[in-house]
Image (tube, rainbow, N blue to C red):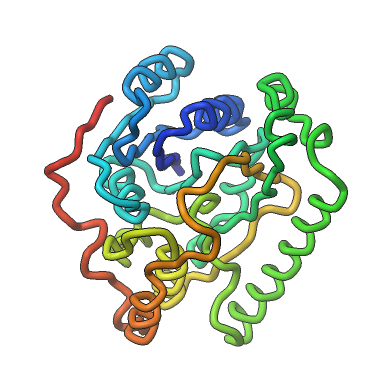
Amino acid sequence: MSISLIIPVFNYLNLLEKCLFSVYRQSVHPDEIILSDDGSDEDIVAFYNAQKRKTAIPLILVRQKHLQFRAARVRNNGVSVSKSDVLVFLDQDIVIPQDYLKCIMANLNRRRFLSGYPVRLSKEQSDKLTFEIIEQNNWDAILTAEQKGKIQKQYKKDFLSYLLFRYLHLGGHGAKLRGGVSAIFKSDFELVNGYDENYIGWGNEDDDLGRRLQELGRSGFNFVSNQIPLHLYHTHYHDPGERKNANYSERCKKKISHRNYRCQKGLSSVRNDLEILE
C-alpha cells in the first residue's frame, strides 16, 4: 500500500524543519509528502524549494490564503492532491521516531482508523531535541519516566475502549481521533467526504470526523506504545480551552448516524483558489 503523508502548515517553519528531518529518516518512506499551507507569513515557498533538494521523496506544496483558522479545509486540501491508498496526517510540530510509519502500516486494517498520542515537550526539552538526537533516534535523552508512563497509560486506556467498542459494541468509540497523529484509508476518508469544512476556528473537527468514521464501521485504534511522537513546544494560536465550534459540533453529533456519515461541505468542495507546486 502507498502512503501520502499530509502535513498542515502555518508559519513555525523551524518546527516543520525538525518534523521533516524525522520523516526523511523513516525506515518506511512515504510515497509522497504534501505540505498543505494555510497562507503562512513566513516564506514557505523558499523553504519548500530548499527541502526538495534534501529528499528524493516527492514533495508537494498546496497553498490557500489565510482568512481564519481553517484546519479542516487545510487537511482536505492536502488530500485533494494526494495519490496514495493510505493518508497519514502529521502536524508540523510533531517529530516522529524512525519506525513510526512502519508501525502504522503494521497496525492499519480495513476496520480501523489509527490515532496516536504524542508527548508534549517542555520548552527546555524541545530546545534539547537537536537534529543529532533525531538522527540517533534517541528519545531516552529527552523523555522522563513520567512522560513514558503517560503514553503507556493512554495506550492501555485506548486499547480497552477499542476492544469494548469493536467486539461488545459498548461505549461510543474506540480510540479518539487525534488528527495530528492519525492514519486513515483514503477510500474511507472519501466515503465520509473528509473533514467538515464548516469547522472554522479551533477545535472539534477531529471529533466530528472520528464519529463519522465510526458510523461507517471503523474503530479508532491507538498504535503508539513505543513509537512515541514528540510534540514540540510553541505558543498557542488560541486561548486554552477555547472551542468556537462546540455548539455546531453538538448539532452535528445528533445528526450523524449509520445512514448519515457524510458531511455536506467536505473533500468534494471546489478548490479553485489553491496554488499547487510540485
Above or below: residue 209 compared with residue 229: below
Q: Residue 170 falls in which quadrant of the image?
A: bottom right
Q: In the picture, which quadrant includes the C terminus?
A: top left
Residue 34 occupies quadrant? top left
Q: Position of residue 234 (x, y in %)?
A: 57, 40
Between 200 and 139, the one lying in front of the other is 200
Residue 193's image quarter?
Answer: bottom left
Counting every numbered tag in the picture gives 0
Residue at image position (47%, 54%) is 238
Relative vertical location of residue 125 with respect to residue 52 in this rendering, above or below: below
- The residue drawn where x is 81% and y is 50% is 148
Residue 101 x %, y %: 58, 41
The reply, left or right, for residue 49 in relation to residue 27 is left
Above or below: residue 256 compared with residue 221: below
Residue nearest the viewer, comparing 198 with 66: 66
Q: Residue furthest right?
A: 145
Residue sitting nearer the eye, 179 or 16: 16
x and y percentages locating residue 8 in the rendered image:
41, 42
Q: Position of residue 51 (x, y in %)?
A: 43, 19
Residue drawn at 40 percent across, 32 percent down:
32
